[in-house]
Image (spheres, rainbow, N blue to C red):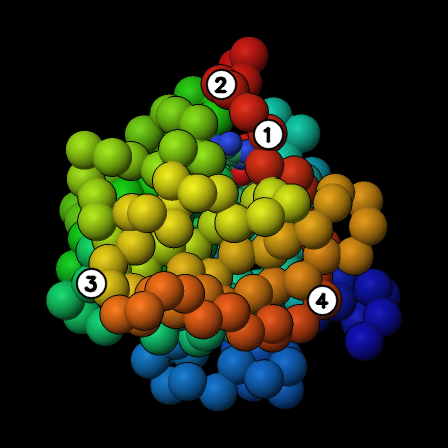
Amino acid sequence: MTGTEDDNPSETLAERKMRFLFALRSRGVTDTRVLTAMEMVDRGLFVRGIFAGRAYEDMPLPIACGQTISQPSVVGLMTQALNVTPRDTVLEVGTGSGYQAAILAQLARRVYTVDRYRRLVREATDLFRQLDITNITAIAADGSFGLPEQAPFDRILVTAAAEDPPGPLLEQLKPGGIMVLPVGQSDTVQSLIKVTRTSRGFDYEELRPVRFVPLVEGLGSE
Ligand code: SAH
């Protein structure tokens, strides 16, 4: 699909949203619960400024603090791989716009999301309040250490790439728990992997190549 078609001014918002869901399906997001959650959460509210008009296209877009809101089909595939159930407590590392957390909140009992930028945490919290989403707690912190006070977690989703799965996150995963994260060096091809904690240790499954912003140490300046 070309940019010109995407910018078609005669297309209504409802038509854009339909096409958005169709694109998700055609890229492998087939889990009905995930598709329903993604239908409920309007990506248009999480993208501001000059890129707002492209919110229903399947592409990553710039957000504040030099970060990005992930590509919707990647959000869908990661959420699907995480296999969230309604009783789960989920940790997300990398709040960004808050879009992924809002989708997780439709599927889980409770979501904790952390970002190293206070500004992103503040803006996402305002949006959650506006949308009446009450089961997300957003915290400014270095997520590579997880959230020891709230651990352990049934599910952990990392939306920034580390070279290896951070040790504290593996420790904070419940037995039977699942973590999905991109691993690899920034600026090279990274792999999305799924880690399952078993009674004996950890199983690793490689899912697909992806490209995420890097997981960076410490709190950001904004
Ligand atoms: N999930 C987001 C997209 C995240 S982009 C969304 O739905 O919009 C990756 C985010 O990870 C960025 O906001 C970045 O600030 C954050 N990040 C990078 N390193 C981090 C760290 N060590 N701890 C917490 N957040 C981190």
Q: Quadrant of the N terminus?
A: bottom right
Q: Can residue 222 be seen in this view?
A: yes
Give how far across and how far down residue 149 sits, in percent: 18, 33
Q: Is mark 1 on a helix, strand or loop?
A: loop
Tell me, for residue 88, which label it has, or none. Answer: 3
Q: Measure the alpha-carbon separation of dots 1 and 2.
A: 8 Å
Q: Which of marks 4 and 2 is nearer the N terminus?
A: 4
> Crowding near pointer 2: few (<14 within 10 Å), some, many (20+)?
some
Give the residue drawn at x 82%, y 50%.
Answer: 188
Q: Is mark 2 on a helix, strand or loop?
A: loop
Q: Mark 1 points at which residue?
A: 216
Q: Which of marks 1 and 3 is nearer the N terminus?
A: 3
Q: Is mark 1 within 8 Å of ligand 1?
A: yes
Q: Measure the alpha-carbon separation of dots 1 and 3.
A: 27 Å
Q: Can residue 17 be seen in this view?
A: no
> Crowding near pointer 3: few (<14 within 10 Å), some, many (20+)?
some
Give the residue drawn at x 32%, y 47%.
Answer: 171
Give how far across and how far down residue 112 sits, in percent: 28, 43
> Crowding near pointer 4: few (<14 within 10 Å), some, many (20+)?
few
| Label 1 close to label 3 by CB (< 8 Å) | no
Give how far across and how far down residue 137 sits, in percent: 24, 38
| Label 4 close to label 2 by CB (< 8 Å) | no
Q: Name the residue under label 2.
A: 219
Check disc 4 and give the amino acid type: Pro
| Label 3 close to label 2 by CB (< 8 Å) | no
Position of 50 with respect to 102 (left or right) is: right
